[in-house]
Image: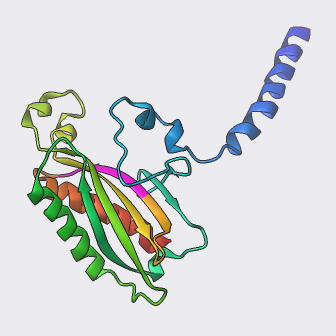
Amino acid sequence: MPRKLLLCCAFLALTTAVLPAISFAGPKQLVDSRDYKDKDFKQCVIADYADMVAGDDVEWLWTNPAQKLAEYKLKVGKVENKSEIRSKSMVESVKSTFSDVFADQAAKGATGTLTADLCIYEAQNMNSAKAWIPFVGLHQMQAAIGIEMVLLDEHDKPVAKFRHFAREGGQIEAATQEVVSDMMKYIAKH
């Protein structure tokens, strides 16, 4: 009987000490992630990753809490390519895709216009050889792109930062559509 009581008390003490720590833990930060610590992590257009956290629609992000992103009109600024695939047509395609989506957005720009500086940090063409990887092959074989986007106000101060990677379809353009769609879902909600 005393042994059971001791085990019961130890379990109660452990759950009392551990559960509050788990429930009050903040969001996962990019600088603490495996992605950031990986030797292949490429820094792009984002100067400081320290404040970026895991998001729902977008992998990593930071937004100025004082700004309502959905109220701004967006326009594309500079577009860089730091991926291993060096292609002017890919850069133009990314710029065009973002420009088209920004033009279609519902915001009237009542608050102003934000400039989106973009950087491609990773790009992968479709690779049908990956289809044979057990359990994930059909997903892994798809084209992929990773893009960073910094939204700047009229004083060139960052209002939001996004870093997102997506796989979709057989062409990099389809993956680009997926990335911009995910980013716009977040912007529309915030």
Q: In this image, 173 relative to 167: left or right?
A: left
Give the residue at x 13% y 34%: 131
Instruction: Pick whichever, 68 or 23, lies toward us.
Output: 68
Whether residue 174 is visible, yes or no, is: yes
Q: Position of residue 98 (x, y in %)?
A: 25, 69
Q: What is the quadrant of residue 8 in the picture? A: top right
Give the residue at x 35% y 49%: 44
Q: Is residue 3 above or below residue 119?
A: above
> Start and end of the magenta stretch?
162-168
Q: Position of residue 130 (x, y in %)?
A: 14, 32
Q: Is residue 2 above or below residue 46?
A: above
Give the residue at x 13% y 47%: 86
Instruction: Indicate yes or no whether the magenta region holds residue 188.
Output: no
Q: Position of residue 19 (x, y in %)?
A: 73, 36
Give the residue at x 13% y 28%: 132
Magenta stretch, overall SS: strand
Whether residue 1 is visible, yes or no, is: no
